[in-house]
Image (cartoon, rainbow, N blue to C red):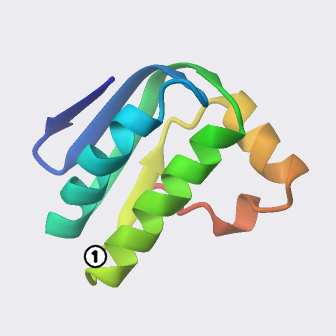
Amino acid sequence: MIVQDGDCLRLSGALTLTTVSGLLEAGRAAVAAGDCVADLSAVTRVDSAALALLFAWLRAARSAGHRLSLVNAPTALVSLASLYDVDGLLPPAA
């Protein structure tokens, strides 16, 4: 689930192959409208689709001239990004 609170996108629940497709467009629209912070503190489970989702949002933000930052990334997401050697591509906290 995604809730927009000002410039903050609060994500909750699982970010997996079965859930991220429903979040893609809402996040793209939010990051294209202005700088955003994605708060991942309530994310309970991730797989590689979570990384794909965040990178899609990051591309949309950059294309629109905006920034996307991540806060409270779950350990599993950080580990997965490190495993795929893309951890350096994740945007740091604001």
Residue at image point 33% right, 70% down:
61
Q: Using the rendered view, name the quadrant where residue 79 is placed.
A: top right
In the picture, measured across the screen, residue 94 lies left or right of residue 5, that is: right
Residue at image point 26% right, 61% down:
31
Q: Quadrant of the N terminus?
A: top left
Q: Amino acid at mark 1?
A: His
Up-down relation of residue 3 to residue 31 (above or below)? above
Residue 38 shows in the view = yes
Q: Using the rendered view, name the quadrant where residue 73 is placed.
A: top right
Horizontal and vertical percent position of residue 75: 71, 30
Horizontal and vertical percent position of residue 4: 17, 38
Q: Nearer the viewer, residue 58 or 91?
A: 58
Q: Which secondary structure, mark 1?
A: loop
Q: Quadrant of the C terminus?
A: bottom left
The count of marks equals: 1
Q: Dot 1, crowdedness within 10 Å: few (<14), some or many (≥20)? A: some
Horizontal and vertical percent position of residue 45: 62, 19
Residue 94 shows in the view = no
Q: Nearer the viewer, residue 39 or 47?
A: 47
